[in-house]
Image: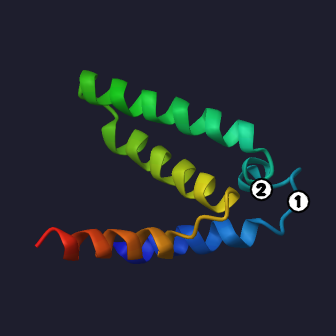
Amino acid sequence: MLKTLEELIATIRKRKDASVKTSYTNKLLNDKKLIVEKVNEEILELIESIQKNSNKVHEAADVLYHLMVLLEANNIKIEDVMDELKKRKKNNK
């Protein structure tokens, strides 16, 4: 399960070197306004799908993808986010 997320992150990082013309991910990585708009849009679509009880998994996948791109576009490493979550877990015991 987590391997798929790791593969997604690796793919996003590889796309940093791709052409904007051929890579949607690279286009998002290089347009911070666009990726913020996409994350907002995808979160709203997920909320709507939850309320309607339809297409939830698809919309959740879209949110995760766009969130990972947003993090990479802003030099926020998922590894650092995971470390922060580990720290919080230790503090809540």
Which of the 4 quarters of the picture holds residue 76?
Answer: bottom right
Return the residue at label 2. 26
Look at 34% across and 34% down and name the residue there. 55
Look at 34% across and 29% down and name the residue there. 47
Give the percent coordinates (x, y) of residue 53.
Answer: 23, 28
Q: Locate residue 50 relative to residue 76 in the image: left or right.
A: left
Q: Nearer the viewer, residue 76 or 88?
A: 88
Q: Nearer the viewer, residue 15 or 92?
A: 92
- Amino acid type at circle 2 is Asn
Q: Earlier in the sequence, mark 1 or mark 2?
A: 1
- Amino acid type at circle 1 is Ser
Asked which secondary structure carries label 2, the reply is helix
Q: Residues within 10 Å of mark 1 (few under 14, many from 20)?
A: few
**Where does the C terminus fall, quadrant-wise?**
bottom left
Look at 53% across and 51% down and name the residue there. 67
From what the image shows, is residue 61 above or below residue 5? above
Q: Locate residue 53 relative to residue 4 in the image: left or right.
A: left
Q: Nearer the viewer, residue 82 or 43?
A: 82
Q: Nearer the viewer, residue 56 or 41?
A: 41
Give the percent coordinates (x, y) of residue 63.
Answer: 47, 45
Do the residues bearing badges 1 and 2 touch, measured as CB atoms within 8 Å? yes
From what the image shows, is residue 50 above or below residue 81? above
**Where does the N terminus fall, quadrant-wise?**
bottom left
Tag shown at residue 19: 1
Asked which secondary structure carries label 1, the reply is loop
Which of the 4 quarters of the picture holds residue 51?
Answer: top left
